[in-house]
Image (tube, rainbow, N blue to C red):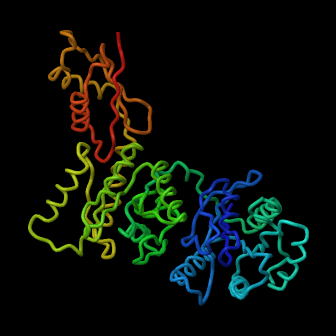
Amino acid sequence: MGIVAIVGRPNVGKSTLFNRMVGQRMAIVDETAGVTRDRHYGKCEWCGNFFSVIDTGGYTTNSEDIFENEIRKQVLSAIDEADVILFICDVGTGITDYDLSIAKILRRSTKPVVLAVNKVDSALNMYGTYEFNSLGLGEPICIASASGSGTGDLMDRLVEELAKVNPAEKDEQELKLPRITIVGRPNVGKSSLTNALLGEQRNIVTPLAGTTRDSITTRYNKFGYDFLLVDTAGMRKKNKVSENLEFYSVMRAIRSIESSDICILMIDATEGVQAQDMNIYSLIQKNGKGCVIVVNKWDLVEKETLTMKNFTKDILQKIAPFTDVPIIFTSVINKQRIFDVLKHTMQVYENYTRKIDWKALNDAMMPEIEAHQPPLYRGNEIKIKYITQLSTRVPSFAFFCNHPQQIKEPYKRFLENRLREHFNFTGCPVNIYFKEKK
């Protein structure tokens, strides 16, 4: 039906309401003001009506938050992008100067505005909502986003306003799109890469580590590519995660890896390959996701004749034995090789989803097996009869044989290497299973 943007000053309950509307804990909620920074998208359904909802950071002016200007830009972008604006206020504090500033912006906007007063969790609090009529944005709706009180009336009103706007029909296939997640340690350039690919200042970028807190999902639809791009918070070692907010941010990043198809692992070229980079890579592998390694800030590295070759060799040694991974050296700030990242990522996705015809698979692999038989088991030959690809998300193959438990890891690795030679699985894990065929 359209897009609803939730706006308001800090700590009025925007993210709590956002999570309730989308039906899951997508946005981090904490008593600390200013948790949400970037705009955060989700899907909402109410009585058979579907629409998108955007959670934004708290709008402030002249505060001590160093992210204030960037958050304000994100809020204004969300207002510009939305079809209906949901303005949230707090009954406990009444109308503040920040509320007046936001109301002034919304009155100038041509977009329909729905005013909701939050934290109205008792009949006594309802009397405090009348003063919000003075904002000139219509009669306020009383809600308590934490308990859900009044949110049904609010959703009815939003659907009613969206029906009036009657925006263009949205793509119903979004949930089926490839999901590409950018991961890495803090301050390696994940949000900068997202902004460079999208061609806009989608996510806030600063020199400070930990700027991104939520995992931010954006649809990319350019140059013939159509997928969901997820920017995540930087992942540090457990013993260095000191705040609850950072812990939740890291958990969001891990969940984003789990729900992704392909992960872009970003490494800081100026710091080299760190142990935490390998921990993140291991997490990608354990979850069976495709991977592209991007070495960022390459413009800041002093180069000699074999610098890139040696750096690549170092990465491959550390990620062994699975070394069939694209490695791209970039400078996101200078937009150097950005399109190469996009091209290799979508090629890996194509490899990840490749289904091989049964005949082609056996015609390629059975001669390899005949030429290099598995080692004998108690003097008896191990015979592999045929191979089939399993209908799983991760490329997986079942080899049917007479003694499946007796085939050891070296021969399994041999079969994987032959599969990679005959069929392009660059960047993808390959699972091999042995099943008994009598």
Pinpoint residue 337: horizontal percent, then vertical percent: 28, 67
Please tell me in which quadrant of the rendered image residue 205 appears.
bottom left
Residue 113, above or below 21: below
Pinpoint residue 338: horizontal percent, then vertical percent: 32, 66
Q: Residue furthest left?
A: 305
Report the number of discs. 0
Residue 203 falls left or right of residue 262: right
Residue ID at (33%, 23%):
434
- The quarter of the image holding the C terminus is top left
Residue 202 falls left or right of residue 29: left
Residue ID at (70%, 77%):
111
- The quarter of the image holding the N terminus is bottom right
Please tell me in which quadrant of the rendered image residue 372 appears.
top left
Residue 3 falls left or right of residue 187: right
Pinpoint residue 356: horizontal percent, then vertical percent: 34, 33
Residue ID at (32%, 23%):
399
Pinpoint residue 29: horizontal percent, then vertical percent: 62, 64
Residue 252, above or below 350: below
Q: Viewer-proximal residue, 108 or 29?
A: 29
Q: Viewer-proximal residue, 379 or 395?
A: 379
Residue ID at (72%, 71%):
86
Please tell me in which quadrant of the rendered image residue 315 appears.
bottom left
